[in-house]
């Protein structure tokens, strides 16, 4: 029984390991590889919670360990991706450091999430994995559409992206969570729409489609909120 209770935490540590290795690869100049390690970390992040619920071994230490792992994989790693991209294209030495707002506000977001009881069926603010996926797949998006590659790699754009999405981590904006209490179309039309858009874009464009999926996620959430408040 004691060994079973450690399985979710072991999976969480694999999330952390993915983030650490991803950081090493990005520092060594393999910026495109960052997305793969974030995706791998996200899979481990899903399965550690799934395993804890399945084995009925949820614990406070597991909750805290999960946040620490997420900070590295979904905070520090995407911050390093933006930093490396900005550094390559910037002639001002200090400018790329402004992208490091991402890990800072990711830490605040994760701390708030642990204390916020409102996020059982809906996220308040952009989840750190979604933010990390958006940032890490921007290089693929730029490669897919070469005409905007220069614009996307401009230091000011990267810094602007860092700050806008870091702030989105903390805004009081209810966002769709793919947590189904029922499966009726009427009650879950925005969830199903998000899944359909996501699958279609990823099948069409691969990793380059993920930034569009994240933008669609934000857009659908805003539309859902506006309709529900009427």
Image (cartoon, rainbow, N blue to C red):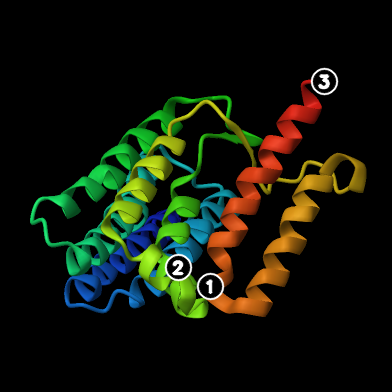
Classify 10 Å Cα crowding around label 1: few (below 14), some (14-19), many (20 and above): many
Position of residue 146 measured from the top left corner of the image (x, y, whole percent): 46, 78
Helix, strand, or loop for circle 3? loop
When the figure is inspected, residue 57 is found, relative to residue 155, above or below; the finding is: above
- How crowded pointer 2 is (Cα within 10 Å; few <14, some 14-19, many 20+) is rated as many
Which quadrant of the structure image shows residue 16?
bottom left
Q: CA distance from mark 3 to mark 1?
A: 35 Å
Q: Is residue 88 visible?
A: yes
Give residue 183's position: percent from left, percent from top.
Answer: 86, 49
The residue beneath circle 2 is 137
Q: Position of residue 122 (x, y in %)?
A: 64, 35
Question: At 57% from the left edge and 54% from the top edge, which residue is drawn?
Answer: 214
Residue at position x 34%, y 77% in the image: 33
For label 1, the residue is 208
Number of marks present in the image shown: 3
> Any mark on residue 11, and which?
none
Q: Report the side of 205 relative to 150 (left or right).
A: right
Find out whether the residues at labels 1 and 2 contact each other: C-beta distance under 8 Å: yes
- Which of these two is toward me, 228 or 2? 228
Which numbered disc, 3 or 2, marks the residue that appears first in the sequence? Answer: 2
Query: Could you say where residue 47 lies in the image, as x and y percent from the top left?
Result: 52, 61
Quarter of the image that includes the N terminus = bottom left
Reading the image, the residue beneath label 3 is 230
Comes first in the chain, label 3 or label 1: 1
Residue closer to the observer: 156 or 117: 156
Instruction: Decide which of tag 1 and tag 2 comes sooner along the chain.
Output: 2
Secondary element under disc 2, as helix, strand or loop, is loop
Instruction: Indicate the quadrant containing the C terminus: top left, top right, bottom left or bottom right.
Output: top right
């Amino acid at each position: 029984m004691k060994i079973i209770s450690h399985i979710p935490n072991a999976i969480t540590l694999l999330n952390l390991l993915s983030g650490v290795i991803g950081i090493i690869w990005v520092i060594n100049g393999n910026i495109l590889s960052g997305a793969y390690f974030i995706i791998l970390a996200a899979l481990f992040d899903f399965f550690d919670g799934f395993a804890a619920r399945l084995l009925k071994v949820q614990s406070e230490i597991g909750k805290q360990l999960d946040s620490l792992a997420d900070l590295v994989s979904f905070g520090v790693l995407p911050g390093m991706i933006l930093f490396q991209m900005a550094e390559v294209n910037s002639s001002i030495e200090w400018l790329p450091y402004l992208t490091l707002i991402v890990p800072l506000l990711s830490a605040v977001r994760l701390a708030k999430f642990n204390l916020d009881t409102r996020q059982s069926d809906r996220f308040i603010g952009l989840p750190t994995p979604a933010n990390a996926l958006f940032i890490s797949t921007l290089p693929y998006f730029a490669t897919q559409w070469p005409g905007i590659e220069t614009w996307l790699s401009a230091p000011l754009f990267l810094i602007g992206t860092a700050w806008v999405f870091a702030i989105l981590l903390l805004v009081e904006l209810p966002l769709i969570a793919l947590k189904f209490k029922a499966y009726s179309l009427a009650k879950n039309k925005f969830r199903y729409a998000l899944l359909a858009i996501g699958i279609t874009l990823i099948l069409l464009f691969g990793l380059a489609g993920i930034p569009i999926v994240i933008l669609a996620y934000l857009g659908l959430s805003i539309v859902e909120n506006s309709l529900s408040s009427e």
